[in-house]
Amino acid sequence: MATLQSLAFASPVSHCSNQPRFLPGISSGAVHHRARSTFSGQPLHLTSSCRAPQRQYFQQSRLTILMIKPSIQFIQGTDEQTVPDVKLTKSRDGTNGMAIFRFDQPSVFDSSSEVGDITGFYMIDEEGVLQSVDVNARFLNGRPAGIEAKYVMRTPRDWDRFMRFMERYANQNGLQFIKS
């Protein structure tokens, strides 16, 4: 107990200017044990002048909305210029679905030699990125002719998020929905 007392009195927290030390439960150097507490040291009570200063300035919050042009990428950082043909399927119970994107003569084939390899299928808008790795290239006479990418939606929430992206992408690129 003597060690705890000496640490408490040596602590910089216990030496506040203009404030007397208040150590209840101590009489003649004996530690007072409370019935329901396992604490056997000396409690220290700090007044407001001993506590660390709190910053009193407030920063004015500003809402900044960054509008990102919806885009599709096969190589991150390089937008695909070709507008795809998109086919949607949805399960009867509406819990899952698939979007199949077909690109004829995509611009990624022109830039992939200088920018890098196709790393996936990325649909980017102001909400974030939807991505898939189910990407297949189609070749004619040994030359790349097209790309087919599939995006699988496993929950109604995934479906709703995809539809928000497609609405933005369609408005940006002049697509329209035709129910078959």
Image: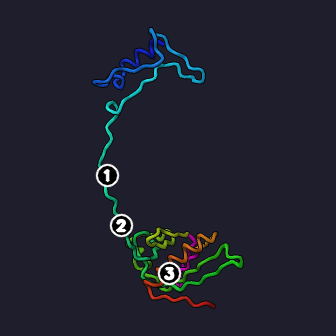
Instruction: Write down the residue under mark 2.
Output: 64
Q: Split into 4 quadrants, where in the image is the C terminus?
A: bottom right
| Residue 167 badge | 3
| Residue 17 badge | none
Q: Quadrant of residue 37?
A: top right
Q: Who's the residue at 45% across and 74% down the image?
A: 73
- Name the amino acid type tagged 1: Phe
| Residue 58 badge | 1
Q: CA distance from mark 2 to mark 1?
A: 18 Å
Provide the secondary structure element on which disc 3 rests.
Answer: helix
- Of badges 3 and 2, nearer the viewer stands 2
Residue lying at the far right of the rendered structure: 92
Quick one: label 1, few (<14), some, or many (20+) residues within 10 Å? few
Does residue 59 sit above or below 6 in this rendering? below
Horizontal and vertical percent for residue 21? 36, 20
Q: CA distance from mark 3 to mark 2?
A: 22 Å
Q: Who's the residue at 53% across and 22% down the image?
A: 39
- Name the amino acid type tagged 2: Thr
72 with respect to 157 (left or right): left
Q: State the residue in front, 103 or 40.
A: 40
